[in-house]
Amino acid sequence: MDEKLPEHIAIIMDGNGRWAKQHLLPRAKGHEQGGKTVQRVIDLCRERGIKWLTLYAFSTENWGRSKLEVAALMKMLVKYLRERLPEMMEKNVRMHAIGELYMLPENARQALQESIDATAGNTGLNVVLALSYGSRQEITAAARALAEEVKAGRLEPADITPEMLESRLYTAGMPDPDLLVRTSGEMRISNYLLWQISYAEIHVTDVLWPDFDRADFDAALAEYAARERRYGKR
């Protein structure tokens, strides 16, 4: 296809549980299948020359799930990071993470940091995992940081700009997403990158995340290419 491409794609990976239910499997199997889709989409982004991919892997609200499911998800995260690290190095993928990472179990934090450190010199696709992430919490933390500077006398409230707040978000230094993709047909943002997707194009598909394949990825890119991005200027 000859089309304009987004620099940054953000994805809400939804539907693992429903996929497992449809296939009469435990929820953990749906998450495992979803992990395979992650790798497929990473390869598709590399193939197309996409520079940034941000994946909503675990939200702050997900801590409210059963302890058994949360433990299984954390175990899968560690397994995925350690097993895929050699491949990330081979494919020149750089790993990043955003969110309240201190809430992750120690082994998950360690595996994540190992991947971030090992891939820091890679120059290909940037993969950002949103883990223990909630956008309202992120914006609140940024506002709190600005408030501390005002309190310390280093900043006047009237001088605060959107750029100042943006520089204190977890995503500081990263480009905003051009395209937000949500699988499973749900029509909501779910506390994901609320500041950063202000002008992103949104593509919602009924396909469950474990089934999201090349054709679905191409459909999202084609819809993006067909849209005219006006940023409210006309």
Image (cartoon, rainbow, N blue to C red):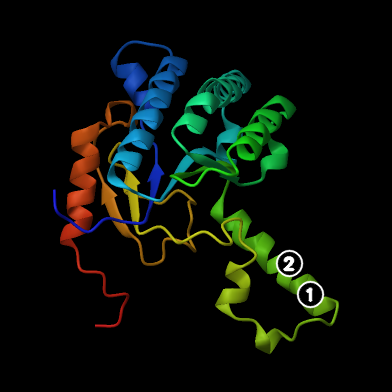
User: Where is residue 132 shown, x and y percent of the image?
Assistant: 60, 41
Residue neighbourhood size for the residue with mark 2, other residues' Cα within 10 Å, grouped as few (<14), some (14–19), many (≥20): some
Which of the two residues, 184 or 117, is positioned nearer the viewer here? 117
Toward the viewer: 231 or 140? 231
Label 1, on which residue?
A: 149
- Binning the other alpha carbons within 10 Å of mark 1 as few (below 14), some (14 to 19) or many (20 upward) gives few
Q: Mark 2 near mark 1, Cβ–Cβ under 8 Å?
A: yes
- Give coordinates of residue 131: x percent, y percent: 58, 40
Residue 33, label in figure? none
In the displayed structure image, the side of residue 166 where residue 100 appears, left or right:
right
x, y percent for residue 41? 34, 35
Q: Secondary structure at mark 2?
A: helix
Would residue 108 be found to the left or right of residue 194 on screen?
A: right
Q: Is residue 155 above or below residue 172?
A: below
The amino acid on which the numbered mark 2 sits, given as a three-letter code, is: Ala
Q: Which residue is mark 2?
A: 145
Tag 1 secondary structure: helix
**Please, is residue 99 above or below residue 212 in the view?**
below
